[in-house]
Amino acid sequence: MTFSHEFYMQRCLDLARNGLGAVAPNPMVGAVIVHDGAIIGEGFHTGYGKPHAEVEAIKHVSNPLLLPESTLYVNLEPCNHQGKTPPCTDLILSHKIGKVVIGQADTNSIASGGIHRLRENGVEVITGILERKSRWLNHRFNTFHQQKRPWLILKWAQSTDGFVDSLRDKPANKKPTWITDETCRRLVHKWRSEEQAILVGSQTVLLDNPELNVRAWIGNNPLRITIDRRSQLFERFQNPSQNNFHPVTLRLLNHAQPTLIYTGAFHPDEPNLQFVRLSPEIPVWPQVLADLHARNIQSVLIEGGPTLFNTLIAGNLWDEARVFIGPGWFGSGVKAPHFPFRAAEQSDFGNSKLFIFNREEGEEREEREEREEREERKEREEREEREERKEE
């Protein structure tokens, strides 16, 4: 039985997702090899520095003599450069595969060029199959290479009446009030394992003393990041009597995992702890995002407070937001960020409702609604004009 190109490309996408959290800064890629309508080999990129999807798929073909008569499906343009592994275009040409079907072109200018090279060598290449799905799968990778910054995910939990915390000006006042339950927190740790970095503000570090690691899930710990522009952490370290935490008790500074601190003061690096001096003459976020791009960080999960979130929202510096609304009622406290957007997804999770927002989809939806409204208005005006003519 022969299926459509879309059928086999969907299989590529399903395979590629297995690399989430393991392949960055590489993209997630799946590959399927089809002969006479039957899949004879498939694979996906399992980890950074490991063989690419095309290599894995070809490796699993039991009879390589069938390859010249087969079609290779892959959700991303085969790479055309020597990196940690050889170019996949060389492998395809060496096996004389005559037809390649691709989901999206590579947005990394260093690795792109595979489509052109394959066609130059007589390979039939079909592009744009499930392109939107292919682009969404690698939205982190695409944003990184096209916008020269990481994909930014905002995450917070708020009570039913719109508060994220009780009022706390010092760590000794009280511990943070949990809004979500253990089920939701386990999901958050899964999210942490899927992103390259996690970021909080210095006030969150001082008030909550978070570990920012993966404990309730299995996966890699993200790079921990905080922004301490006014060097609050350093001042309190130098004056322990003014601080309820002794420096060694701050979990962010326990050297347990790679940690990055953007600061306004000089501080020497320590094991697993790197400091980046911010320039006072340049806005903070362009500096931070440019530095993260230079470090090959393609995604950041941001779990800061409302001040941090409101700054990012006002500057349109977000791509996705994941918001839990729990059952609690605070009455007063720290207000949740002002977020006047419509959710793309909504579901019940644990004791809370989970709302997922996507900035790009929201913008597209607004443009579509505005266009539809203009068309309806134009149609209404034309109808009214025709009716007026009839009356005359």
Image (cartoon, grey):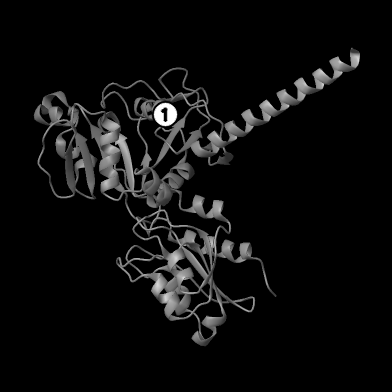
379 sits to left or right of 206: right
377 sits to left or right of 16: right
Q: Where 355 falls versus 126 (above or below)?
A: above
Q: Where 301 falls versus 215 (above or below)?
A: above
Determine crowd level at label 1: few under 14, some 14-19, many 20+ residues with C-alpha closer than 10 A.
Answer: some
Element at label 1: helix
Query: Callout 1, which amino acid?
Result: Ile
Counting from the top left corner in percent of width and height, residue 80 is at: 38, 66
Can residue 165 be spotted in the picture? yes
Residue nearest the observer in this picture, 324 or 374:
374
Q: Quadrant of residue 302?
A: top left
Q: Quadrant of residue 203?
A: top left
Residue for point 41% across, 53% down:
107
Q: Quadrant of residue 269?
A: top left
378 sits to left or right of 213: right
**Residue reaching furthest top?**
392
Counting from the top left corner in percent of width and height, residue 300 is at: 36, 43
Say which residue label 1 marks: 313
Residue for point 67% across, 31% down:
372
Counting from the top left corner in percent of width and height, residue 227 is at: 25, 34
